[in-house]
Image (cartoon, helix red, strand yellow):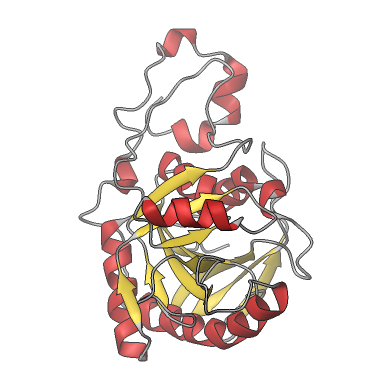
Amino acid sequence: MEPVSVGVIGGSGVYEMEGLTDIKEIRVKTPFGDPSDAIVVGTLEGVRVAFLPRHGRGHFISPSELPARANIYAMKSLGAQRLIAFSACGSMKEEIAPLHIVIPDQLFDRTKSRPSTFFGEGIVAHVGFADPYCPDLSAKLCQAAVKAGATVHKGGTMIVMEGPAFSTKAESRIYRSWGVDVIGMTALPEAKLAREAEICYATLGLVTDYDVWHESEETVTVEMIVQNLSRNAEMAKKIVRLAIRTLGAPTTCPCPTALQTAIITNPAKIPAEAKQKLSLLLKKYM
């Protein structure tokens, strides 16, 4: 099968990618279990693309239960060099309104018990994560969003909460005092795992609500989020179609060499089982 170059992870409300041709549905097996669903591989704007619905078609996997390691590993195994992730999010600032698009450049982790690394079991790696999103991919998504006619906010911090319940008012007020821009439930550990897998990763944040801090807005409900997502999803797909034409292979960002100086374990001490399990990530360094 021809390798894909771009992966797309669809978030809440985005369970398929229209416009793909020459489609093949693949069930990928990984050392970290099965991905969220079958991956649909096809051609979009002349580029081989792999699409995965993060929560499964029918939305049956909660944020805390997502097989993030399997999802990222599967994309890596298919050849993805770039990964565009859709993420429903709440706004923490007045000027970022529902139906706007945010392309964040920073993350703040408030998750609790999600496996967030491929490493361990005898092999230790510390990747750089000061800038958690690929600057090159994010910039191209922003350019495409402007061209698509979206109201887009470039940069900003996404705080990632555990969920699945929404914030309390106290939490929302405190998060706002920290200066974050949007809140979501799924960008972590995805972004960390993508960095370990040396895949360029960027998020299209689809703003659905004002969380619960905004006194003049309705309380956040699933119904509200689904209604706004359905309106925002079409814009997000348009942005992806425009962006894909401009991507090409990564050239200037540090993402494709993130592991080059990250592995601290003496190679002679790494168990054979660990080497085998992570051979997809380690083969160019071991």
Residue toward you, 119 or 109: 109
Tell me the residue at 79%/61% (across/down). 60
Question: Residue 256, how many percent across, how many down?
Answer: 33, 46
Question: Residue 109's x, y, as percent?
Answer: 48, 43
Can you give x and y, in whole percent of width and height, for residue 53 in the image?
A: 65, 66
Q: Quadrant of the N terminus?
A: bottom right
Q: Going by the image, does 227 lie left or right of 252? A: right
Q: In the figure, is residue 74 to the left or right of 7?
A: right
Q: Residue at x 70, y 61 (%)?
A: 55
Residue that sits furthest to the left in the current view: 252
Q: Nearer the viewer, residue 256 or 106?
A: 106
Residue displayed at 41% across by 76% down: 101
Residue 248 falls in which quadrant of the image?
bottom left
Q: Is residue 10 visible?
A: yes
Residue extending farthest front: 215
Residue 203 location, quadrant: bottom left
Above or below, comparing residue 159 to residue 258 in the picture: below
Residue 78 visible here: no
Residue 148 position within the rendered picture, expressed as x and y whole percent measured from the top left: 37, 89
Viewer-nearest residue: 234 or 181: 181
Task: Note whether 34 is above or below 208 in the view shown.
Answer: above
